[in-house]
Amino acid sequence: MVHAFFYLKLRKTFRNYYILLITFHLRMNLQSVITAPSKNRTFVPMDYSIETWEGLKPYFEHLLEYEINSQASFDFFLQNIDELMAIIYEESAWRYIRMTCDTQNAEKLQRFQQFVQEIQPEIAPYADKINRKIYESPFFVELSERKPEFKNFCRGLKGEIELFRNENIPIISEIQMLSQQYQAAIGKQTVENEGKELTLPQAAKFLESHDRTVREAIWHKVADRRKLDWASFDEILDKLIALRTQVAHNAGYTSYTDYRYAELKRFDYNREDCARFWDAVEKVAKPISLKFAAERKERLGIDSIKPWDVSTDIFGGEPLRPFETGEELIEKSVAVLKNVKPELGEMLALMAKLGFLDVESRVGKAPGGYNYPLAESGVPFIFMNAAGAQNDVITMLHESGHAVHSFVTRNLANQSLKETPSEVAELASMAMELITLDSYAVFYPDENTRKRAQKEQIMRSMTLFSWVATIDAFQHWIYDNPIHTHSERTEMWKELYLRFHGDELDWTGFEDTRDRLWMKQLHVFELPFYYIEYAFAQIGAMGVWRNYTQNPTLALNQYLSALQLGYTRTTPEIYETAGISFDFSEKYLTDLLGFAYQEYEKIVF
């Protein structure tokens, strides 16, 4: 017994020392990245900015002419490429950001279009030549052995060379312009209510009302407005499917599905794994969603749940109003992150100080929300459409997770080491949604109100899977069957929606709206196949959260240590560093959903 006691005490001592050690290491690293943007160029002049292809072209020509005759010259070559690409990425980012912040501004739109149509197509063939120059260098073979952190870079480079085709350059530009058409159309969608013009995110606040007649009235207005764009959205998707299929065929792929898997660099899972995950969602996640639906019906005292009943609070009280202005949202979000770890709040505060946050909904603004890393500055930009609802808090904390990821990878030696796969990127954001639950007092000083918000968020995290599976399976069908009619597409969506959602909502009389719900998901138009990652990352986030409930300090440091890796390790290794498994099996999903449901039931008021 003495020996056992001594062993346990010693193990606890080493564990505490380990926690202190990585905490100190993280604190030093985090402080080093909380600084304002600054340029550090050695290859391109400090005062150079991209305006035309003619001004940019000499830098690419210099790289192609550069002689690689030693390991040192090879590394210097990579360093110069990285510097040039960081400048290009940042210019592209700002043009996209400014356009999405104001889709109706002709000058901002023109600059975005100029980059997409005149500069980006010229870059592509030069980038391919540079990729081949790297790949064909005798020093490339030993790169991943000499620098193991470049293993994914080497795998990715080979894939980019295999995918590149000159004839796809103008097609890809056309695809980007079609995606912008969708964004602009969404940005124009407004409804009138009580004499005021509202964007759809602003109108959504009325769906939280306890007055069912108010909810139903606003739902009809939103549905009727969206209906006006059905035909044009079908047409845009038709064109996107045809163009993307042509891109795949040009690259030697039989379907865009397989091409896109290669383009997304999905090294650690395949389409068969996705199909197995859909089955797991149907068996495990769908029953839980139906269980929540039954609770909603009972608490609201209604016979069936109509689509205008899904956003209202089922726990009583007035609709959750965590903030009134965008400035207040930012201020409170900074406080939440500081509660988790002071340096995290300082990161968001720096972004606010620099004006790198655009959070309020307004007419003409593109839909959705994003965190856009700025490659040269090292400080990201957050874009969203807040209207004063709890969902806006979730979006802000989600995008803040991405922002933290951008900050902590800032000092990695190469841009490619920062470009994590989506399964890792979304782990950063979705874990942040859950580990900040204990800090909701910042938004909700009243205990009962705070508990309502926490229960809503846990419920939301558990019911996400059915929608993700529907979108993912739908996109697989679309691109595996590119020649189809609108009615066939509608029928397939209906079939998949019912498969993963069942009868949780009563759509009687509004089946046409249900069968076009996919049109509101911007990923279908702009980021095809980028969606199942949210489900995989949500499973991982629940694992981080479970660890956090048991040992907050260790779990948080493991999470941040994983993010600091960028893409210097494989996805399973990054998840392992975070203290979790890259596992989306039925068994693991059952385990973590079981944990989350227990946490949901613990919150009583």
Image (tube, rainbow, N blue to C red):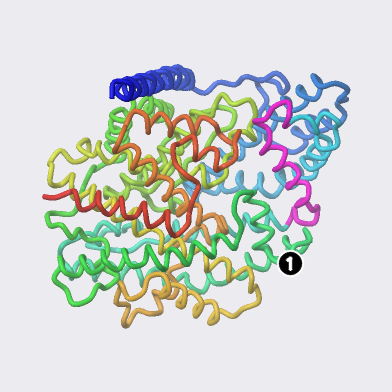
* Quadrant of res 188: bottom left
From the top left corner, tell me how far across and down residue 103 is, in percent: 50, 51
Looking at the rendering, in which quadrant would you find the N terminus?
A: top left
Q: Is residue 186 above or below residue 341?
A: below
Residue drawn at (73%, 47%) of the image: 159
Query: Quick one: SS at disc 1?
Result: loop
Query: What segment is highlighted magenta in the picture?
Result: 144-170
Residue drawn at (26%, 67%) of the image: 293
From the top left corner, tell me how far across and down residue 485 is, in percent: 59, 80
* Quadrant of res 428: top left
Q: Does 151 appear in magenta?
A: yes
Please state which of residues 63 and 267 is positioned toward the viewer in this rendering. 267
Please, what is the dominant secondary structure of the magenta stretch?
helix
Residue type for callout 1 = Thr
> Which residue in the protein does label 1 denote?
254
Within-10-Å neighbours for mark 1: few <14, some 14–19, many 20+: some
Q: Is residue 460 above or below residue 396?
A: below
Residue most extreme to the front: 1
482 with respect to 538 (left or right) = right
